[in-house]
Structure formats: structure tokens, C-alpha cells
């Protein structure tokens, strides 16, 4: 004997399918946009560590060969507010993002630079991120 399909079971099956589809869409969307936050974190770590290789990877391929140690040195000035700006770390607390146009977003965050003794927070920092060859990079100025 076969099991009977009732209206309640049919609605349950449809609800499960719709719920699963919605979860997949949300996960995909979060995965797509989480790359923006990972890019900002990678950029900040590269600046703090003076890691030119990682720093260059945060920019589009057409400007990567123009980036130098002087560019990192200029960005490290965010730590000049600390008494000892040589050894510092940086952390971003994400506030949101705004779509500018196709493939371009402004990412908003608070930036905290810190060392063992002190910290300073820059509020409402923003960076423009774009897609380049399938990955998020910072828009070159």
C-alpha cells in the first residue's frame, strides 16, 4: 500500500523546497559580498606587516606593477596617532556597504590601529571595491 499525499504534506514539501532555495540564495549572496570584507582585512594586514606582495594583490592587475614600498609607507601613516607607530595592528569593524553601480561598492567601516599599549579608532572610513578577474580588489585612484 502506498502512502497518501495530503494537502498538508504537499504544503510541507513546497515550504521545505522554498526554504532551502532561499537559504542557498542568501548563502551565495553573503559569500559573494564577504570577499569585500576579507579584502579590507587583507589590505590592513599587509599595511601593518609591510607586506608588499599581499598589498599588491589588493589592487587591480593593471596597476599592481606600479605599486611600491612608498605606497605602503604612506598608508602606514594611519598609525602615527600612536606613541609607537612602528609595530601596530589594524582591525576593521564593518558598518555597511553601498552599491555604486555594477560591480562597484563602497564599504564602510571603523578602523582601529593599536599596539600593546594604546589604540585609536578612525570612524566612518570607506573604500571602494570592484571586481577584477573574478575577485574583489580596491579601486585604484
Image (spheres, helix red, strand yellow):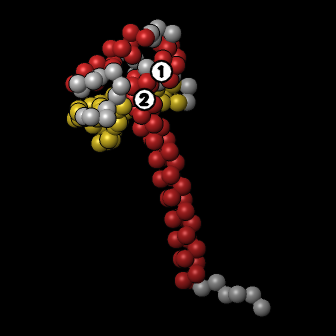
Circle 2 residues within 10 Å: few <14, some 14–19, many ≥20: some
Residue at the spot x=36%, y=31% of the render? 89
Horizontal arrangement in the rendering, residue 39 relative to residue 87 (left or right): right
Distance from Cα at disc 2 to Cα at disc 1: 8 Å
Q: Residue at x 58, y 78 (%)?
A: 10
Q: Are marks 2 and 1 in contact (CB under 8 Å)?
A: yes
For residue 81, say whether it is visible.
Answer: yes
Q: Is residue 82 left or right of residue 58?
A: left
Please give the name of the residue rendered at 49% of the width and 14% of the height, measured from the top-left corner.
Answer: 64
- Residue at figure coordinates x 52%, y 30% from the top left: 135
Q: Secondary structure at mark 1?
A: loop
- Rendering coords of residue 19 (x, y %): 51, 65
Return the mark for residue 74.
none
Residue 114 pos. (x, y %): 30, 33
Examine the image and state in which quarter residue 70 appears.
top left
Looking at the image, the residue that sits furthest to the front is: 117
Residue 110 picture quarter: top left
Please state the total of marks drawn on the protein image.
2
Residue 81: % across, % down: 22, 24
Q: Which residue is outermost to the right?
A: 1
Residue 10 as seen in the image, left or right of residue 128: right
Q: Residue furthest bottom?
A: 1
Q: Earlier in the sequence, mark 2 or mark 1?
A: 2
- The crowd level at tag 1 (other Cα within 10 Å; few <14, some 14-19, many 20+) is some
Q: Quadrant of the C terminus?
A: top left
Element assignment for label 2? helix
Between 132 and 34, the one nearer to me in the picture: 34
Q: Determine which of the numbered discs, if any, sits on residue 51 in the image.
A: 1
- Percent position of residue 130, x then y: 43, 27
Labelled disc at residue 45: 2
Amino acid at each position: 500500500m502506498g502512502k497518501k499525499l495530503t494537502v498538508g504534506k504537499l504544503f510541507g514539501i513546497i515550504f521545505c523546497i522554498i526554504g532551502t532555495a532561499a537559504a542557498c540564495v542568501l548563502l551565495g549572496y553573503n559569500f559573494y559580498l564577504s570577499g569585500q570584507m576579507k579584502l579590507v582585512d587583507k589590505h590592513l594586514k599587509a599595511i601593518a606587516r609591510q607586506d608588499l606582495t599581499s598589498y599588491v594583490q589588493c589592487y587591480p592587475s593593471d596597476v599592481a606593477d606600479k605599486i611600491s614600498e612608498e605606497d605602503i609607507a604612506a598608508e602606514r601613516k594611519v598609525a602615527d596617532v600612536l606613541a609607537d607607530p612602528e609595530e601596530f595592528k589594524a582591525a576593521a569593524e564593518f558598518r555597511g556597504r553601498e552599491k555604486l553601480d555594477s560591480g562597484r561598492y563602497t564599504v564602510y567601516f571603523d578602523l582601529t590601529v593599536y599596539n600593546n599599549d594604546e589604540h585609536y579608532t578612525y570612524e566612518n572610513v570607506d573604500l571602494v571595491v570592484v571586481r577584477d578577474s573574478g575577485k574583489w580588489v580596491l579601486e585604484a585612484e
